[in-house]
Amino acid sequence: MTGAGQVVTLDQLLGAVTARCGDLQLSSAPPDPADGREWVDLTGLGRVDAVQRSIDAMLATDACGDPGVAGAFHGLYLAHAVAGPIAVAVTAHRALWTLRPGPVHARVHPDGRWFDALAVPRARLRRLGEPGLPADGELLDAAADEVAAFLAPIFRHVAARTRYGLPGLWGHVADQIHRRALAAGRDPVTAWSAAGRLSDNLASRVPLRTRPRLDPPVTATNGFLLTNGTCCLLYRIHSEPYDSGDEAGHCAACPRLRWRPDSAGLPGRSGHDDEETRQ
């Protein structure tokens, strides 16, 4: 792992990960009711009534009434807010924060149901070298434990109430782990390897069956395209071409897109495969 930028306090780590993520603000302060924004207690989504309210809200907004899309977006949005930042913390800073027993609050973006801030007021900092975390392997184990234990009860309820299975939900977690680690790492080879090891640890705990890939395979100097291992089903509700995607509404990282090398040897779109599967 890169080990860039050692941190001493929880607030230092949250600030460093915020800077690397760019689209998610992390804080140890509790949500401020005065900001007028909606906050969701993610810890509470482990309850049936709370997750059903979240699904209903997603169906009425981002998912456009499609239960499968509502399930997929829950996996994507939670992975983006919970798992991705922890991947940055462990791969770039050799530290993490605890998610349990909570609370973990997420702020809803004003233009949708995804999240743009995370508050972990009772989190505890854990760093490489402390008792119980003597080496990278133990740190990755601890990160996988936190993510799996926190998201598993939420995902069980989401999968039971939408047309989207557990492997797909956990597939979004793997996608965000790799995407965040790769964006935050100074050396893409090391970052990709560390993300893979974290996903391996997670796969020993949950039904994770797909991983993202890089086309062409990453080296220290080349350009590459990250293709997700799991589809978010955006194309099912997107009637117009998606920015940086294709004419059928697929995003550029969609695993349903088919690629072939262009004249320069870089990947270029050659079509898509929309055969339906329960992920």
Image: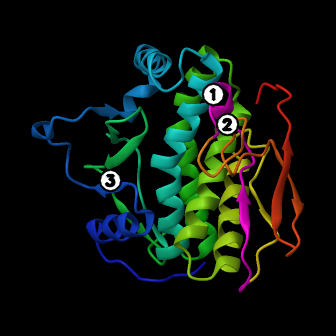
Visible in this render: residue 146?
Answer: no
Q: Which span of residues is magenta-colored? A: 220-241
- Label 2 and label 1: CA atoms lie apart by 6 Å
Q: In the image, is 264 to the left or to the right of 155? A: right
Mark 3 or mark 1, earlier in chain: 3
Quadrant position of residue 190: bottom right
Q: Position of residue 107 (x, y in %)?
A: 31, 40
Mark 2 or mark 1, earlier in chain: 1
Q: Residue extending furthest left?
A: 34
Q: In the image, is 1 to the left or to the right of 45? A: right
Q: Residue extending furthest bottom?
A: 221
Q: Position of residue 217 (x, y in %)?
A: 82, 71
- List the residue tagged with mark 2: 249
- Label 3 and label 1: CA atoms lie apart by 42 Å
Tell me the number on the disc at residue 77: none
Q: Is residue 13 above or below residue 121?
A: below
Circle 1 — which element? loop
Q: Amino acid at mark 3?
A: Ala
Visible in this render: residue 275?
Answer: yes
Mark 3 or mark 2, earlier in chain: 3
At horizontal 61% and vertical 42% (from top left) the residue drawn is 242
Q: Amino acid at mark 1?
A: Ser
- List the residue tagged with mark 3: 123
**Quarter of the picture holding the N terminus:** bottom right
At horizontal 54% and vertical 48% (from top left) the residue drawn is 147
Tell me the number on the disc at residue 239: 1
| In magenta segment, residue 153 | no
Q: Position of residue 149 (x, y in %)?
A: 54, 41
**Quarter of the picture holding the C terminus:** top right
In the foreground, 192 or 228 = 228
